[in-house]
Amino acid sequence: MKLLRLYEKLLNEYGTQNWWPARTRAEMIAGAILTQNTAWKNVERAITNLHRNGALNLGTLYKIPVPELAEWIRPAGYFNQKAGCLKNFASLLHENYTGKLDRLFKLGTDELRAVLLAVKGIGKETADCILLYAAKRPVFVVDAYTRRFLAAHGFEAESKLPYDAVAGTFTAQLPEDVQLFNEYHALIVRWGKFHSNHKDSQSC
DNA sequence: CACCAGGCAAGTA
DNA sequence: TACTTGCATGGT
């Protein structure tokens, strides 16, 4: 079945997901880093701690010492690495883009992706989440759910390809549309969470 | 008790 | 290029 048709079925089944669940771009970026291989529920606790300490903005993240930051995000796991990553990004923004996301986001999509990937702790999925959900670029996000989704719908071979090729499987068949890519990824995650609770059920 | 969750980097072959 | 390992909490 075509991937556009599968999208329509998911949308009909689950409805719009309203991603990314964040009030600001800084919160979105922090969430993207904190959710690496981590249950979203634990990310929410870390986000709440940051918010309570007034640290849910990039200026504060730039100034705060790593050990203190690490304690606040402890519930999200890998807290030392993630604290370093948050600070790496905040430092890059402060030192090269006057601390303003508007300035960083003036870059073209390819260059912006390269800049994000150069930050230690930001890999392809995290970079693409930021590109799609904060910078509003038409980039398709690939995660573990995306591969399971492909494998469950007749794209067994494609599901095992390298990251960029998996993304290409989608972008080659879909119109280049930010809102479509936004909703599709969110729906795939919704699909994945549903099926991880009902492990014996079939694809659909 | 084991296993997983909206990964990444560094090392090895 | 293709594995393997360390990183860490909280839920089931």
Image (cartoon, coloured by chain):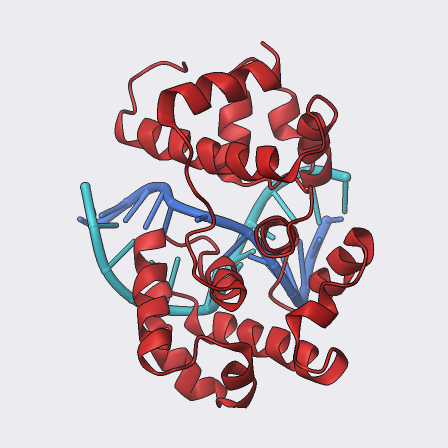
Chain colours: A red, B blue, C cyan
Q: Nearer the viewer, residue A148 or A24?
A: A24
Q: Which of A66 and C2 is in front in this view?
A: A66
**Total count of labels:** 0
Q: In percent of the image, x 39 and y 34: which residue is there?
A: A190
Q: Which of C5 and A118 is in front in this view?
A: A118
Q: In percent of the image, x 44 and y 75: which residue is there?
A: A56
Q: Residue A187 at what x, y percent from top left?
A: 45, 32
Quadrant where the C terminus of chain A is found in the figure: top left
Q: Can residue A196 be seen in this view?
A: yes
Examine the rendered structure and indicate whether residue A167 appears above or below residue C10: above
> Residue extending furthest top?
A1
Examine the rendered structure and indicate whether residue A57 appears above or below residue A5: below
Examine the rendered structure and indicate whether residue A161 appears above or below residue A113: above
Q: Residue A8 at what x, y percent from top left?
A: 51, 18
Q: Residue A9 at what x, y percent from top left?
A: 46, 16
Q: Is residue A155 visible?
A: no
Q: In percent of the image, x 40 and y 54: which residue is there?
A: A38
Quadrant where the N terminus of chain A is found in the figure: top right
Instruction: Indicate left or right for A81 with A200 as reference.
Output: right
Instruction: Indicate left or right for A150 with A201 as reference.
Output: right
Instruction: Indicate left or right for A112 with A49 as reference.
Output: right
Q: Residue A84 at what x, y percent from top left?
A: 54, 77
Instruction: Tell me where residue A67 sits by quadrant.
Output: bottom left
Q: Which of A119 and B13 is in front in this view?
A: A119
Q: In percent of the image, x 68 and y 24: which residue is there?
A: A174
Instruction: Tell me where residue A202 sits by quadrant.
Output: top left
